[in-house]
Amino acid sequence: MIEVYTDGASRGNPGASGAGIYIKAQNKTFEYSIPLGEMSNHEAEFYAVLKALEICLQEFPGEILSFRSDSETVVRVIDNDFTKNKTFLPFLEKIRELTAKFPYFFIKWIPEKENSHADQLARKAI
């Protein structure tokens, strides 16, 4: 099972944004800091999940994925597989498409203090 910690950060809302991805896999760790350009914090959080799924598809195809995020909004939308928010809907549709390529995908909300590594990577990307 691959453990994936994601976080999005924005300087301003909207503002310069970045995604942080911290992956624990096969007794190794992988870190990604991805600049995202100008967007809202919620959008950065969704992009962090999307970018992490793209990385997992390339680096860990066929693995079981266990994602963790401190964004209650992102976790709720993905867990419920539903949103009324027109801005979030394209993210959810793309996440559905990517997660379908894995045997199992889980996402869990964690407190910010347990996601500090991904947070640092996201801030570094701004």
Image (tube, grey):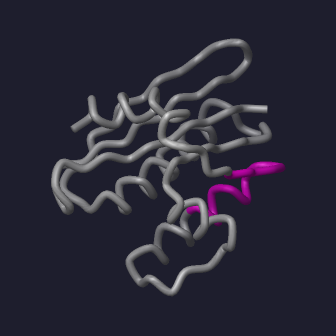
Residue extent of the magenta highlight: 95-107
Left or right: where 44 falls relative to 114: left
Q: Quadrant of residue 54?
A: top right
Residue at the image position 53 percent from the left and 60 percent from the top: 72
Left or right: where 21 falls relative to 8: right
Residue at the image position 42 percent from the left and 54 percent from the top: 45
**Residue 106 forms part of the magenta stretch:** yes
**Residue 58 forms part of the magenta stretch:** no
Q: How many discs mark residues in the rendered view?
A: 0
- Say which of 71 and 24 sits in front: 71
Residue at the image position 74 percent from the left and 51 percent from the top: 106
Residue at the far top in the pictured view: 27
> Residue 57: image x %, image y %?
63, 41
> Residue 50: image x %, image y %?
50, 52
> Residue 4: image x %, image y %?
61, 36
Left or right: where 85 falls relative to 99: left
Quarter of the picture containing the C terminus is top left
In this picture, is 121 found above or below 13?
above
Left or right: where 100 falls relative to 10: right
In this picture, is 23 found above or below 63?
above
> Residue 24: image x %, image y %?
64, 24
Quarter of the picture containing the N terminus is top right
